[in-house]
Image (cartoon, rainbow, N blue to C red):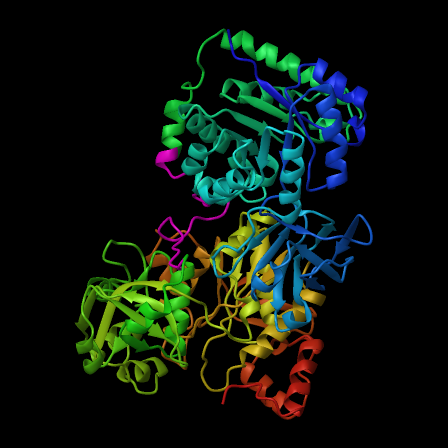
Amino acid sequence: MVKKIKIIATLGPATNKEEDIVRVKDKGVDFIRINMSHSSLEDMEHFLKMAKKVKIPFVIDTEGSQVRTGELSTPTVDVSENSEIKIFDKPIVGDNTKLSLKPEGVVPQLEKGDLIQIDFDTAVLRVSDTSTISRGYITAKVVTAGILGKNKAVVLDRACGRPLHLPILSKKDYDSIKLGMEYGVGHIALSFARSGKCLDEVRRATQNTMQVISKIECVDALRNLDVIIAKSDYLLIDRGDLSKEIPVEKIPFTQKIILNKAAKAKVPVFVATNLLETMINSRKPTRAEVHDILNTILDGAGGLVLAAETAIGKHPMECINMLNKLINHAQLAMDGSDVSQKEEEFVSKLLAKNYLLDSEVSSSLIEPHGGRLVNRVAVKIPEKSYLDSLPKINLDENRQRDVEQIAVGTYSPIEGFMNKDNFNSVLDRMRLSNGLVWSLPIFLDVSEEKAAELAVGSDVALVDERGEAMAILNLEEKYHFDKTEMAEKLYATLSDEHPGVRWIFNLNPVMLGGKITLLRRRDNEDKEYEMTPKQTRSLFEERGWSKVVAFHTRNVPHRGHEFIQMKAMEREKCDGLFVHPVVGKKKQGDFNAKYITKAYEIMTEKFYPQNRVIFGTFSTYSRYAGPREALFTALCRQNFGCSHFVVGRDHTGVKDFYHPKASHNIFDRFPDIGIKAVCFDKVFYSPTLQDHVHLADNPEHPEDDSQHISGTQARKMFEAGELPPAWFMRPEISQMIIDAVKRGEEVFVR
């Protein structure tokens, strides 16, 4: 005889009377619950009294360690792209300009650049200013327009990569437990079970009087799944909240893995969310819903949960009838056999691929260079006493940026500063020693004296200008190099007029190789825009993009840039554009990063097509390596999730050291990279056509009808207080720059 599949029904406005609960019990429902994220203690006691009278088991449903939005003046509010929203730590009544998050204590933990994704398929915000936290709020900008709802689940994608500190149970949860114990409740569902520690706290709070149903609805639960199973009486897969943290297409296979693992441990599993969603309003389910439920049972589910269907739906009793009908039908196929092992081979293959925790396994985006996005960010910061005991290396600004980009995966597959084999291989053939394409050495140079202080195999603290540890280097190798050979191979010149050559001849004589672990990110005024590859990939996926073209620059946008950006999207049929200017140290005469950012803010707010463009800054520095650097900057954008990369005329070049099309041609030498170069020649303006023209597409266009775009000429005009013509640059951007020059601000690098 097949063991009966248990049913949990959620009560609410559609089932709030005693006669409703009597009917629910009569239909064979095993447990009832209410959703405490949307209910009060008074609501809970109301249903507890009826449950006790009717003699049907009640399950306490905790709020758990989840971030949610606070109250709003209306049920929902629309927010537009680039609008600003103040986010308060304490409860307020919000609108489209302000919002609170709960539980209290979450907002002060947020940092510039953190992404705030609200509910499913709604708005995405990016933290832009945390300086006002002493006044109880921070500021965020809307990255993706959408809807804000009250009491909606929030997923925080942190730039630092570390988890928030959240209470395991809320104050309302502890009050619910106390009330439940008074009524003799025997089961509790722990929302957002993240670790074994969460289970221990629930056991303590309930004094071991209740069986614990651990709700699997976040990535942390997947990461600690085996421990959670071992400490639980039941599991509950909440597919709704889980789909906010992993791609929706991963839910079915993830469900199979959880059911398989739990079956081996003999822990029953409930499955929840969207079982009979259609029947909230209709009397019959869809074929897809029927198929889903039957397969869920056959995969080994021990129970099913009706949520909105019985809480607020128009046909709660019909939903229970339908679920019973499907359970009975599934048992025709089961016929007393054990189905727990039927997916063993399938699940084993998924587990071997690290399916649960591999964020790229189902992505529609290009895979990272080398197949895996590197993450070298410390989950836990070592004790200060340990860091103080380590030998120290002072990092300049450029090395600080390198350490950060290594750690967050921008330089994937690089995990640290290169050893001698990789260093020489990159210089000799633009490949790592394993054959993977890589065009620029990532190195850390030190003096002979400093190198003598360091022991291979030991940890070294990498410190910033304040002497504070930013990262740890596990030193694997020390080696010397030839500066002349390095300069000649990297830049194809030894001329001291080349800034890269001068840089190399000023390096220290010893290189250090080894993996790094980032302790904290750099702080600078562009931090809100410095998204990590993990964040941009999440944003691209959230927008439904699969083909994304990246645009690299170190200047404010002129109309030629704008033409190329839109033409690249059109030519390659890309879903979106990622504008990604470099904001690290630049050469004399370049625009300071502040004005590049301001200019692109204007473009995003006023001129770019809505929901087609994402702007972020690239915290690295120009090496002025011409074609080698073009390849490097493309591979970095592949790690950010971009399938295409704009390569302009004389891309990352300097003076006349490289042929204007050298950066185009280098991509022909490396067909084994994933990202595709989208090459452009000169772009000029035609007064006759009153439009911009790409020379390669119109080689016969008369020169006397070609007005060329000159950055040097524009700079002279700005310094003289003159506006460049509108065909050259958007007047709104030109005016912003002129106003800054008039105020005496340092618009250009001196």
Q: Going 51% across and 41% down the picture, which residue do you hit?
A: 204
Residue 386: give x, y in percent of width and height.
Answer: 31, 68
> In the rendered image, which quarter is residue 264 located in?
top left
The part of the chain drawn in magenta is 351-378
Q: Going 44% across and 56% down the picture, which residue do you hit?
A: 638
Above-or-below relation of 658 to 213: below
Predominant secondary structure in magenta? loop
Above-or-below relation of 390 to 74: below
Q: State the residue lying farthest toward the front.
A: 182
> In the rendered image, which quarter is residue 104 located in?
bottom right
Q: Is residue 101 within the magenta segment? A: no
Residue 245: give x, y in percent of width and height.
Answer: 55, 45
Please count the marks in the image: 0
Would you say 312 lies left or right of 733 here? right
Q: Nearer the viewer, residue 365 or 469?
A: 469
Residue 558: give x, y in percent of width and height.
Answer: 61, 74
Above-or-below relation of 715 to 214: below
Would you say 31 lies left or right of 280 here? left
Would you say 746 lies left or right of 584 here? right
Residue 33: give x, y in percent of width and height.
Answer: 67, 30
Q: Tell me, yes or no, if residue 363 can be seen here.
A: no
Above-or-below relation of 331 to 635: above
Q: Going 19% across and 77% down the picture, which residue do you hit?
A: 453
Q: Nearer the viewer, residue 418 or 387?
A: 387
